[in-house]
Amino acid sequence: MHVLKEMIKVENDFIHMRLPRKCRGKIVSVTIDLGNDVEKKMMLNKIKIDTTQWKFTRDEIYAES
């Protein structure tokens, strides 16, 4: 896996990014992360999960195979 990270200020509806030569002919995956994290802050403390009834045996989780 090859990871490229580039910060780009979006001026219009297009993003232009030069890729390494080894990407030619390959399928690439692009993930867009908005730097200000507004979407994450909007969900802050909105979802609550009650874990007080969860039961587990620690020995089963950490047992060596």
Image (cartoon, rainbow, N blue to C red):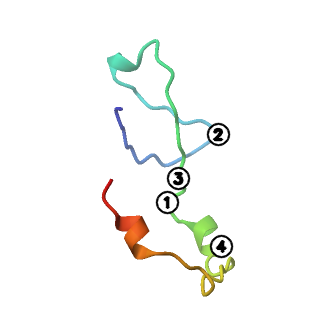
Report which residue position mark 1 lands on: 35
Which type of secondary structure does the marked residue at label 4 adopt? loop
Horizontal and vertical percent for residue 59? 38, 72
Checking the image for residue 13, the label placed there is: 2
Disc 4 target residue: 43
Whole-percent x, y for residue 45 in the image = 63, 81
Q: Nearer the viewer, mark 3 or mark 2?
A: 3
Callout 1–callout 2 Cβ contact below 8 Å: no
Instruction: Examine the rendered structure and indicate whether residue 49 appears above or below residue 12.
Output: below
10 over 30 or under it: above or below? below
Picture quadrant of residue 37: bottom right
Q: Is tag 1's residue or tag 4's residue first in the polypeptide sequence? A: 1
* Residue kind at label 4, given as amino acid type: Met
The percent coordinates of residue 62 (x first, y second) are 35, 66
> Residue at label 3?
33
Q: Nearer the viewer, mark 1 or mark 2?
A: 1
Marks 1 and 3: CB-CB under 8 Å? yes
Residue in the picture at 39% in, 26% down: 19
